[in-house]
Amino acid sequence: MKITNNLSGRNSFFLALAVFWTLLIAVLCLISFNKMPSVGIKSADKYVHSIFHFVFTILWFLGLYQNAPFKKSLLKVTTFSICYGILIEILQGLLTTTRKADVYDVMANTTGAILGVLALYLYSNYFKKKPL
């Protein structure tokens, strides 16, 4: 998978979105939300983590995927998403006083990444004649 080949056209748009989304996740996960009102949905933050990594996985896949094998690319992007989620959790524990590292957040991140892969796979196999 050559990143330099992806800097034009459709892929560059998704790559820019992927970078923006990655930075947005970092900011939202590392700042304090103590003054925010409670949502009232049990474990709402786990749903947010899943959505973050669902979108993260899809955007990075669309931004980086060119002519590499489809399944291998999915594996790389999924691994990247899971590792990024773990890194953010570690940083929450090390760099913030109002947030803490949470293994359940890592599980939610992983669930979101896997759901993103599933969505890409289903789209590729059932709605298109050939993989993205």
Image (cartoon, grey):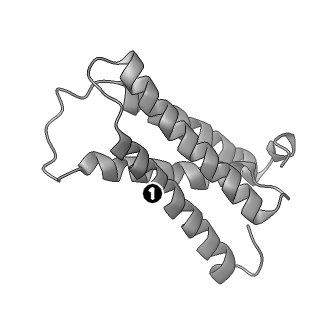
Choose top left, top right, bottom left or bottom right for residue 95.
top left
Q: Position of residue 2 (x, y in %)?
A: 85, 45
The answer to whether residue 47 of the structure is visible from this angle is yes
Front residue of 14 and 113? 113
Q: Position of residue 78 (x, y in %)?
A: 61, 52
Residue 12 relative to residue 21: left or right: right
Q: Secondary structure at mark 1?
A: helix
Identified at 26% across, 22% down, the residue is 98
Does the rendering let one see residue 62? no
Location of the C terminus (image quadrant): bottom right
Residue at the front extreme? 103
Q: What residue sits 58% from the left and 52% below the top? A: 57
- Rendered location of residue 24, percent (x, y): 47, 34
Counting other residues with Cα less than 10 Å from the Cα at mark 1, is it few (<14), some (14-19), or many (20 or more)? many
Q: Which residue is mark 1?
A: 111
- The percent coordinates of residue 90 (x first, y second) are 45, 28
The mark tally for this picture is 1
Task: Work out whether residue 25 or residue 94 is closer to the camera in this orientation and state it.
Answer: 94
Residue beneath the point at 77% across and 76% down: 130
Residue sitting at x 44%, y 24% = 91
Residue type, mark 1 in image: Thr
Q: Is residue 38 above or below residue 42?
A: above
